[in-house]
C-alpha cells in the first residue's frame, strides 16, 4: 500500500522531475524510466534528471525522458527522488530539489534519511522498482510491455537475480504480474549479470587473481589501482560485477572491493550474507546502502583506505 497523500500529489501536478542517486544502477534507471513512461501515459510531463549511466541499459524504453538539465519551459512542480538514500546522493540535482515546491522520496535503503515532504520508504521492499509497481497500480495507470521491462530490470538487478534475502513472495507476485507483458527476461538477465566485454572479463580475472582471504577465509578483500585498470584498457565501469564474483567464493561472508576512481578518490563496495551488516561500515565513512550491499567513497590513497577499512570491518563484523 502506498501512502494516499503521495498518490494525490502525483495526480495533482504535471511538471514532474524524477531523479535517482548518482552513478545510477539498474534499480535507479528502471524506476525512473518506468515511472516516466507511466506518468506520460496519463498526460503528465515527466523529466528524468540523470547524468551518465552505463551503456548496458540502452535497451530500456523511457530513456527519451532522460536529460542532464531541466529543459521544460514551465517551472517544475513536483520533484520525486527514486532509490536515493540521502540528499547528497542526488549530486548536482540537489539544487533542483531545493527549489521544488513539493518533494517526494520513494526508496528502500535502510539508511534513508526521509528528506522529502512526503516519504515512501519501504525498507522491506526488494527494490525501488517493486515500490514503483505499487505506485503505478495505485495511480490506476495500466502497465504495458515497456513499463514492465523497466520494472523487471530494476527488481532483477537489486535482488541479484532473485537471490538476495530481500526477495519476498510479494517480489515474485510482482514479477508474475509483470510477465503478463512482453518482457525479454533472458536478454535482461544476461545483460545484467552474465555478459561482459573482453576488457571487463580480463579485469575480473586480474581482480580474482589478487584476492586476499582474511579472518579464516570469511573476509574477501581486493584492491584495484587506476594504473592496473588502465593497463588493461579498463575503466571503472568494468568493475561492475567483480564484487559478486568475490562473494561467490565458498565460505566467504563479507567481501570488500576498493578501487581507485582517481587520485585520492577511492570507491569502496561491500557485500555480505546474513547478519553481517555492511551498511553500518559504509555509514561510518559517509556512505550508505543495505545490510548486505553497501558502499562509500573515501578521499585518501588506496593503501590508507585499505588499512582503515579492513580495521573497521575486522573490529565491527568479526
Ligand atoms: Mn535500489
Image (cartoon, rainbow, N blue to C red):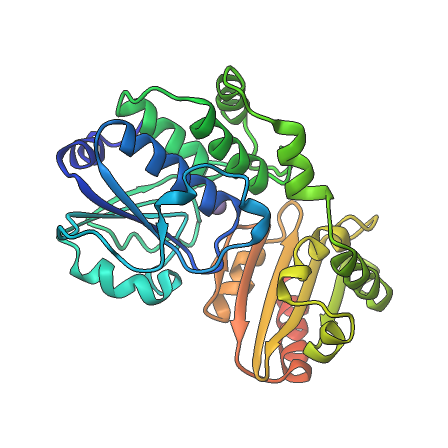
Task: Farthest residue to the top: give it.
Answer: 180
Residue 116 vertical position relative to residue 227 in the rendered view, above or below = above
The C terminus is located in which quarter?
bottom right
Front position in the image: 195 or 31: 195
The image shows residue 223 at horizontal and vertical percentages of 72, 72
Q: Is residue 188 left or right of residue 174?
A: right
The image shows residue 244 at horizontal and vertical percentages of 71, 51
The N terminus is located in which quarter?
top left
Q: Is residue 245 left or right of residue 111?
A: right
Q: Is residue 183 left or right of residue 205?
A: left
Kindly identify the residue that appears in the image at 72 percent across and 80 percent down.
227
Front position in the image: 162 or 201: 201
Please tell me in which quadrant of the rendered image residue 59 appears: top right
Residue 157 vertical position relative to residue 179 in the rendered view, above or below = below
The image shows residue 303 at horizontal and vertical percentages of 69, 83
The image shows residue 162 at horizontal and vertical percentages of 62, 32
Kindly identify the residue that appears in the image at 65 percent across and 67 percent down.
235
Is residue 107 in sight in this rendering? no
Amino acid at each position: 500500500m502506498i501512502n494516499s497523500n503521495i498518490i494525490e500529489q502525483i495526480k495533482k501536478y504535471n511538471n514532474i522531475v524524477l531523479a535517482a542517486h548518482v552513478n545510477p544502477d539498474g534499480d535507479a534507471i528502471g524506476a525512473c524510466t518506468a515511472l516516466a513512461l507511466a506518468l506520460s501515459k496519463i498526460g503528465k510531463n515527466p523529466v528524468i534528471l540523470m547524468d551518465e549511466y552505463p551503456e548496458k541499459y540502452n535497451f530500456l524504453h523511457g530513456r527519451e525522458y532522460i536529460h542532464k538539465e531541466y529543459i521544460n519551459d514551465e517551472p517544475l512542480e513536483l520533484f520525486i527522488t527514486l532509490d536515493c538514500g540521502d540528499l547528497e546522493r542526488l549530486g548536482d540535482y540537489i539544487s533542483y530539489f531545493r527549489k521544488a515546491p513539493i518533494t517526494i522520496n520513494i526508496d528502500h535503503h535502510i539508511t534513508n534519511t526521509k528528506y522529502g515532504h512526503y516519504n515512501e520508504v519501504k525498507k522491506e521492499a526488494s527494490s525501488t522498482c517493486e515500490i514503483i509497481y505499487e505506485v503505478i497500480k495505485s495511480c490506476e495507470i495500466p502497465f504495458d510491455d515497456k513499463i514492465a521491462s523497466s520494472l523487471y530490470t530494476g527488481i532483477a538487478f537489486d535482488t541479484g537475480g532473485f537471490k538476495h534475502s530481500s526477495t519476498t513472495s510479494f517480489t515474485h507476485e510482482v514479477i508474475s504480474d509483470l510477465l503478463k507483458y512482453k518482457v525479454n527476461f533472458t536478454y535482461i538477465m544476461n545483460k545484467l549479470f552474465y555478459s561482459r566485454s573482453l576488457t571487463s572479463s580480463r579485469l575480473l580475472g586480474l581482480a580474482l587473481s589478487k584476492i586476499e582471504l582474511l579472518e579464516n577465509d570469511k573476509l574477501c578483500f581486493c584492491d584495484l589501482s587506476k594504473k592496473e585498470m588502465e593497463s588493461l584498457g579498463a575503466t571503472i565501469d568494468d568493475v561492475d560485477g567483480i564484487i559478486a564474483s568475490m562473494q561467490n567464493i565458498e565460505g566467504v561472508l563479507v567481501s570488500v572491493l576498493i578501487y581507485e576512481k582517481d587520485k585520492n578518490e577511492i570507491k569502496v563496495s561491500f557485500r555480505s550474507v546474513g547478519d553481517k551488516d555492511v551498511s553500518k561500515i559504509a555509514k561510518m565513512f559517509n556512505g550508505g546502502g543495505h545490510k548486505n550491499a553497501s558502499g562509500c567513497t573515501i578521499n585518501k590513497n588506496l593503501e590508507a583506505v585499505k588499512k582503515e577499512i579492513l580495521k573497521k570491518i575486522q573490529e565491527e563484523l568479526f
